[in-house]
Every structure is written in structure tokens, then in C-alpha cells.
Image: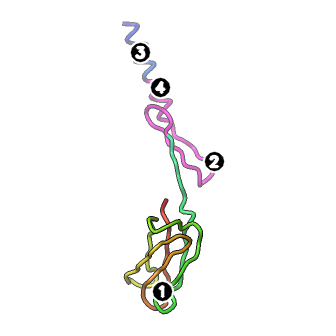
């Protein structure tokens, strides 16, 4: 009986210790805690992002973060609800849309 009480007590202590609230020292810190202890969190910020203003419906963004045509790029027209075409290539991004709309883009890793 004492062994069973000891096992339950140890399990209770471990559960309580692993479910504590994680506190971040900065707003940009990300942490996680699970029932079996800490969890590994990997965050890769989108370092290749920005806005491009179209000139006669197109823009050419030159940036070395674009490494080829297999890059995944998200683009959205922030001016109007219009379709946008983004085509990455090595060192640049071609953006096609409507008129002089502003296009937000981000390369995902």
C-alpha cells in the first residue's frame, strides 16, 4: 500500500511540475511546456518579406533571399480585392497585378 501511495505522490509531483506556466522574458520569446516536461519550439521568422507598389501592373523585387523558382511565396493585394501573380527566381521576385496596387509578399522557408 505504501508503495502505491509513493507512486501516486511522485506522479502528482511530476505532473504539477511539468504543467507550470512558462514565462517569457521578452514578448518575442516563445516557450512551451507539456505534461512530460518542456517542448522544443523552433521559430523561423519570415526574413524575406515586404511590400511592392506596382507600376503599370507589375513590379520586380530584387533580393538575394529568393533562391529559385521552388520558393514558396505568399502575395496579397492590400489595395483592392484583385488577383496577384508572384513568380520567384534566383535573386528576384516578379509580381503581376492590377494598375498601381500595393502588394505584400513573404517568402516562406
Q: Dots 3 and 2: beta carbons under 8 Å?
A: no
Query: Cα distance, mark 3 to mark 1?
Result: 68 Å
Q: Which circle's residue, 4 or 3, is located before the other in the chain? A: 3
Residue at 44% in and 70% down: 74
Of residue 101 and residue 71, the one placed in the foreground of this image is 71
Query: Cα distance, mark 4 to mark 2?
Result: 24 Å
Of residue 18 and residue 74, the one placed in the foreground of this image is 74
SS for dot 3: helix
SS for dot 2: loop
What span is in magenta?
Answer: 12-39
Q: Is residue 87 above or below residue 101?
A: above
Numbered mark located on residue 58 in the image: 1
Q: Which circle's residue, 3 or 2, is located before the other in the chain? A: 3
* Mark 2 burial class by Cα count in 10 Å: few <14, some 14-19, many 20+: few
Residue at 59% in and 47% down: 24
* Mark 3 burial class by Cα count in 10 Å: few <14, some 14-19, many 20+: few
Percent of width and height locating residue 37: 49, 33
Q: Which residue is mark 2?
A: 25
SS for dot 1: strand
Query: Cα distance, mark 1 to mark 2?
Result: 43 Å
Q: Which residue is mark 3?
A: 7
Residue at 48% in and 72% down: 88
SS for dot 4: helix
Task: Please tell me how many numbered marks the rendered image carries.
Answer: 4
Q: Which circle's residue, 3 or 1, is located before the other in the chain? A: 3
Query: Cα distance, mark 1 to mark 4?
Result: 59 Å
Amino acid at each position: 500500500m505504501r508503495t502505491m501511495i509513493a507512486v501516486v505522490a511522485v506522479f502528482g509531483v511530476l505532473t504539477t511540475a511539468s504543467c507550470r506556466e512558462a514565462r517569457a522574458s521578452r514578448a518575442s520569446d516563445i516557450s512551451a511546456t507539456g505534461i512530460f516536461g518542456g517542448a522544443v519550439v523552433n521559430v523561423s521568422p519570415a526574413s524575406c518579406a515586404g511590400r511592392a507598389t506596382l507600376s503599370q501592373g507589375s513590379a520586380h523585387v530584387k533580393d538575394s533571399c529568393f533562391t529559385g523558382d521552388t520558393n514558396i511565396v505568399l502575395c496579397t493585394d492590400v489595395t483592392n480585392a484583385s488577383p496577384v501573380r508572384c513568380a520567384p527566381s534566383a535573386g528576384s521576385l516578379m509580381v503581376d497585378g492590377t494598375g498601381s496596387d500595393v502588394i505584400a509578399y513573404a517568402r516562406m522557408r
